[in-house]
Image (tube, rainbow, N blue to C red):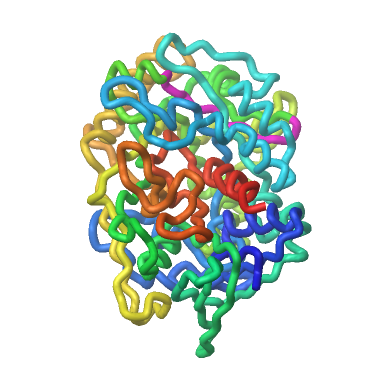
Amino acid sequence: MFDVCIIGGGTVGLFLAAQLSKDGKKVLILELGSHSGLDRRAVVGSNPQSGGHIGAAASAWTTGLGGSSQLWGGQLWPWQEWEFTRTGPGGGPIWPIGKQDLSKHYRGVLNVLGLSQGHSIIHDMGRPPTCPKVDLGDDFSVRYSTWMGARARNLARNSAVQKQLRSVNIVTGAAVHGLEICHDGSTDVQYSRGNEDCSLRARQVVLAAGTLGNSRILSRCSFVSGSDLVGSGFMDHVSARVLKLDVTDWDRFLDVFAYRRYKGVLAAPRIVPHPQYLANRDIVPSYAHFEIASAPGGMVDVAKSFRGARQGNGPYPKAIEMLDAGRRDFWPTASAVGRSLLRHERPVLKSSTVYLRIDAEQPHRPENFIAWNGSKPYASRDLNLEMKWHVGTREKTAIEVMKKDVEAVLDRFNIGGSFEPLRNKFEITDTYHLMGGTAMQTAARPGVVDKECRVLGSQNVFVAGASVFPSGGMANPTFTALALAHRLGEQLG
């Protein structure tokens, strides 16, 4: 009998286990994958969608300890109060909890992950203290997200997390295929390892198998009160390049919009609308940011290829490619690095191309869903993942409106250069932010879990991760998902 069984050894699963282990809980992690390595299609198969084009299923979700933290860039973005409660037409609470319920848990996440409090300082101020406040008028402001370092963002290698996991039991290669509530309130977890069928009991069970995995497990559980809603309302953020900026004054551009370093923390600027701007224009939450595209074949491009190869995204660059890039970009790189050291910025080569990109939230749509079909839900040969996902007019409208207004602001701001529209119709993509499918119930909408993330119809089965989100917020969900997990960890502890 374990105190807590966590299903999934990914980002949220390892985090929650590390937190609970400090409280002396007897914790077990069941992970489908191995201790190391990336196996993205072990479960979803080679063609994991049938409606809409979303790359996240095949590219942003993987098995193995660390889960998607093996793939992500480690960007931390705390939500604002208005992201939980809308203003303007159709406004009102859309979450049963708010920013005030999660504020201390954002800080708790940093503690568990062993991160510098420089993150909190930047989040609270909206910018690094060494960075001057930028005035973009009444409708927009510049706020900074922060990034975890390369050694910290993979939770399977994060030293602070691994230290806390020493007392945690971890079973890999475990395919969970059923949960049953026992008469004493505990939960029987049925799983297999290879050809062997196994089971165990736990006083409390937490599903932390990612948005896809959580919906897969709950779709096979008869005790779930909201079983007809499992998989419904799946969401992602959408993104589009809208403008190409011909920069002629790089010093001016970098003075205002460079990535900054403060106390060893890298911070990235975003052009964020004020809530009243969104309400007045009746558009979904969106924000703008600059995408710096390095010249093909240059040192930065080769470095990105090398990092991508480590994450399973293509082959490693060849030695001759690395030598050619070094010869071509040595002096420009030295100049960029010199400026970055003096000004605490991330180096940018002036041969780069700058794009303006708009990201937008997707509104809740029941017709966007995840469905798992097959008689053996954890045997990939018998499993079919069906995903329905499309981009609606509200997202497209928000991107168009934001593009026009942000362009006008930047034109007045005189950052140098001129804007060049890319095309009349933008290519809109997903952002690999898998959310929804086991959403919290609210006063206005039924759900699968309550505000404590407890599965409706159970007493001791919980869900952790972005799958419980009733809405997607403006931007990156992982920090908020971890804050919810920290809140759940305090409850279970």
Q: Which part of the image, by quadrant, shows the N terminus?
A: bottom right
Expressed as whole percent of the image width and height from the top left, the position of residue 71 reads 55, 56
Whether residue 242 sits left or right of residue 434 in the image: it is left
Nearest the camera: 351 or 178?
A: 178
383 to 274, vertically: above or below: below
Question: At 41% from the left edge and 49% from the top edge, which residue is drawn?
Answer: 435
Expressed as whole percent of the image width and height from the top left, the position of residue 288 reads 42, 28
Expressed as whole percent of the image width and height from the top left, the position of residue 369 reads 29, 55
Whether residue 373 sits left or right of residue 410 in the image: it is left
216 to 112, vertically: above or below: below
Question: At 51% from the left edge and 82% from the top edge, which residue is drawn?
Answer: 192
Q: Quadrant of residue 116?
A: top right
Q: Is residue 355 something that shows in the picture?
A: yes
197 to 414, vertically: above or below: below
Q: Is residue 477 located in the magenta-colored stretch of the structure?
A: no
Q: Magenta stretch?
A: 263-274
